[in-house]
Every structure is written in structure tokens, then in C-alpha cells.
Amino acid sequence: MRYTKWQNERWGEMFQSLIAYKKERKSTNVPEGYTEDPKLAAWVHHQRSYYKNKELSVERIRRLDSIAFVWKHYDLVPWEEMYQRLVAYKKQHRSTNVPNRYAEDLKLGWWVSKQRAFYDNKTLSIERTNLLESIGFAWDALDARWMDMYNKLIKYKKQNKSTRVPCSYTEDPSFGMWVSTQRQVYSQGKLSSRRLKLLNSINFVWVGGRWNKNVGSMV
């Protein structure tokens, strides 16, 4: 989608108005008959229409999703449907750690983030908690990200017979950087005993590029 400079500026102004509305009302569901700001109500209605007709840019969808925009009147996609989408995601990616800005399903990334928030606030039902845990749902996003990288390392070692991933690993730059970061965090004495044990269990090379030295005896 291409927009003029004026259109982008106008859209940005209305988006800020919606943020202010949400801050006050704890919701992005502006009623169509909202008399305090009819323009905002009309704008929200138009965003839903553009989205339904696939006339809304990915960037704008992401910005609206970032504030939990309600795409359907008074209701979101049913919880059970989102759960099944997560099950399908795990089957494909072998992980429940959906990125917040997952391009193939923007709503799923937002939904996963919300489940963690509900869990932290103790507002997620026991039934839903059990369903998520039954598929190995990770409540801590950062730890889930770490485990995803760790599993990549296991796969890398299986293929390459080594845990020496180059820092400038062109096939997956973020993975190469993660491996380097583990060495740095360890050298600073900031790596948790759990992560240290996991890495030692696959004979992780702690000194990159010089010699193969495992710190198993230190655990």
C-alpha cells in the first residue's frame, strides 16, 4: 500500500488519538456512535473495513496490533481458535515462542503475549493454563527465546560435529551472535547454573577460536 505524506500524517494523528482513548477507557473498541469524537469512531470503523478488504498495509496492521486493536466488534477471535493456531505453529516450528511481530499471523504473536500477561496477573483460568502447558507453552518469553536458540545449537552440532558457530554465521547471524553472547555472559560470571549445565551437556566450547575447552568439571 502506498500513501501520501498527508495521509500518513493524518493516520498517525488518529492513531495517537486511539492510544489516548485506550489509555482512558482500557479498550480500543470505539463505538460507532461515540459523540465525544465522531472522527475517531469513523476512523476505527474504516480501519476494520480496510483490514477486512485487505486494503490496510502490513505496517499499519502491526501498529494497530501493538496496542491490541479489536478487529471485530465487541469480540476477538475465539480463544479456542487461537489455541489451535498455536498448536499448528508448534507443529511446524517445534516451539510455542511466537514472535510478537510474526508476519504470517500477526494476531497469533499478540495473542501469545497476552496469555503470558494474563498468567502473570493471575487472570488466566486453570483450564486454559493447563491446555497451554499441555503443549509445552513457555511462560517466560526470554527463557523461551534462549531455549529456541539452544535447540538450534543442538541441531547445528549434530550437522557439523561442533558447537563452534562463527560469530558472523551468514546462514543465521542472530544465532552466531547468540553463541558468542553465551561465552561473554559466562566470562562475566552471569550465566545461570541451569544454562551452564545445559550447554556443558552438549560439550559447548567456551573459548571460541583458540582451543576446545569445556568447563564441565566446574559445574
Image (spheres, rainbow, N blue to C red):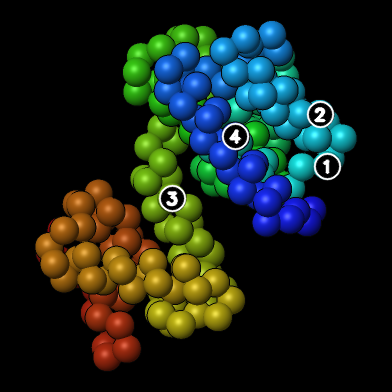
The amino acid type found where label 3 is placed reads: Arg
Whether pointer 3 and pointer 1 mark residues with C-beta atoms closer than 8 Å, the reply is no
User: Looking at the image, do the residues carrying marks 1 and 2 touch, with CB atoms under 8 Å apart?
Assistant: yes
| Separation of marks 4 and 3 at Cα, in angstroms | 34 Å
| Residue at mark 1 to residue at mark 4: CA–CA distance | 18 Å
Q: Give the farthest residue toward the right.
A: 53
Q: Quadrant of residue 69?
A: top right
Few, some or many C-alpha atoms within 10 Å of disc 2 (few <14, some 14-19, many ≥20)? some
Q: Residues within 10 Å of mark 1 (few under 14, many from 20)?
A: few
Q: Residue at x 20, y 52 (%)?
A: 192
The residue mark sitting in front, 1 or 4, is: 4
Q: Which residue is at 51% across, 10% downward?
A: 127
Element marked by disc 3 = helix
Mark 3 lies on residue: 145
Pick whichever of labels 4 and 3 is earlier in the sequence. 4
Query: Circle 4 sits on which residue?
Result: 14
Kindly state the secondary structure of the residue where label 2 is placed: helix
Residue 37 in sight: yes
Per the image, the residue denoted by label 1 is 55
Name the quadrant of the C terminus. bottom left
* Residue 62 at least partly seen: no
Residue ranking furthest to the bottom: 210
Could you give the CA–CA distance between mark 4 and mark 2, rounded to whole angstroms? Answer: 16 Å
Q: Which residue is mark 2?
A: 49
**44 to 55, vertically: above or below:** above
Circle 4/circle 2 CB separation < 8 Å? no
**Spot occupied by residue 114 in the image (x, y as percentages of width and height):** 49, 27
Q: Nearer the viewer, mark 3 or mark 2?
A: 2
Crowding at mark 4 (Cα within 10 Å: few <14, some 14-19, many 20+): some
Q: Secondary structure at mark 1?
A: loop
Q: Residue at x 84, y 40 (%)?
A: 54
